[in-house]
Image (cartoon, grey):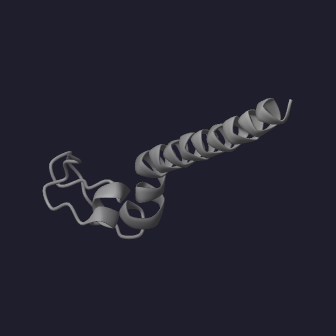
Amino acid sequence: MKYFSSLFSEFYEINFIAKSIFIILHILKFANQHLYYWFYANRWNNGPTNSQNKKCMLDIIFGDDNGQLE
């Protein structure tokens, strides 16, 4: 019985970590779609207009120059 309880606690920790990563990825996906326009593009009227010079928030965070996440 002690083995099963330790196995359950270990599985619970792995499950908690997996759910945390899942939630963080969803938050980053939301930030990538929306927060860039709220905090950057809408601040000035001469913001990015076409899809070639738009950079998503993740590109700004990780310093990717060409707007492509690899």
Front residue of this view, candidates 2 and 44? 2
Which residue in the rendered view is the most extreme toward the right? 1
Give left or right: position of 2 versus 66. right
Dividing the picture into quarters, in which one does residue 53 lie?
A: bottom left
Give coordinates of residue 59: x percent, y percent: 28, 58
Please name the residue shown 41% across and 57% down the image. Answer: 36
Please name the residue shown 76% across and 39% down the image. Answer: 6
Give coordinates of residue 52: x percent, y percent: 15, 48
Which residue in the rendered view is the most extreme toward the front? 2
Give left or right: position of 59 versus 37. left
Dividing the picture into quarters, in which one does residue 44 lie?
A: bottom left
Dividing the picture into quarters, in which one does residue 12 lie?
A: top right
Please name the residue shown 68% across and 35% down the image. Answer: 11
Front residue of this view, candidates 38 and 56? 56
Instruction: Note whether 5 is above or below 34 in the view shown.
Output: above
Give left or right: position of 11 versus 59. right
Instruction: Note whether 51 is above or below 60 in the view shown.
Output: above
If the image is split into quadrants, where does the N terminus sit?
A: top right
Q: What is the total number of numbered labels drawn onto the structure image?
A: 0
Give coordinates of residue 46: x percent, y percent: 27, 66
Please name the residue shown 42% across and 56% down the image. Answer: 37
